[in-house]
Amino acid sequence: MKTDSRRSGQTMVEYIIIVVVIAVAALAVFGIFGDTIKEKASGATSSLTTTEKAGEAQKAADSSSIDKLRNLKSDGSGSDSSSN
């Protein structure tokens, strides 16, 4: 009986490790391709919106994620220069 509960616990730990590895891999992929995904989504959005909104979407896509992170305020809101 104790052997079965140990195996069940071991199996659960193995599944948790697999889920963590997959989550870390997904975060790495999104980190690497984040700007590319943002550009593609911006292109699709700009083709579906009016020209006024398309310009705003393209402007937002032109700035990289790293630049946005550098310009964050301590409370997590955007910088003054990007909110103008």
Image (cartoon, helix red, strand yellow):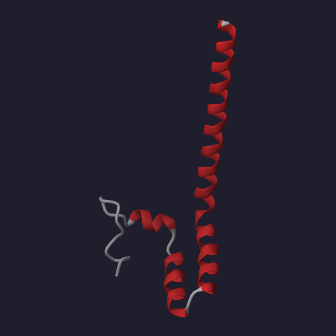
From the image, which quarter does the N terminus lie in? top right
The answer to whether residue 36 is above or below residue 56 is above
Query: Residue 56's x, y, as percent?
Result: 49, 84
Nearer-the-camera pick, 42 or 33: 42
At 62% from the left edge and 85% from the top edge, which residue is drawn? Answer: 48
Give the image quarter of residue 32: bottom right
Q: Where does the image place residue 4, in percent across and percent down from the top left?
A: 69, 12
- Towards the viewer: 11 or 59: 11
Q: Is residue 15 above or below residue 8?
A: below
Q: Is residue 54 left or right of residue 69?
A: right
- Count of all numbered marks drawn on residues in the image: 0
Residue at the extreme front: 1
**Residue under the image location 52 percent in, 88 percent down:** 55
Q: Residue at x 30, y 59 (%)?
A: 75
Residue 27 x, y percent position in the rendering:
59, 51
Quadrant housing residue 51: bottom right
21 over 55 or under it: above or below: above
Please give left or right for residue 57 compared with residue 40 in the image.
Answer: left
* The image quarter in which residue 7 lies: top right
Q: Quadrant of the C terminus?
A: bottom left
Task: Tell which residue pokes out farthest to the bottom in this image.
Answer: 51
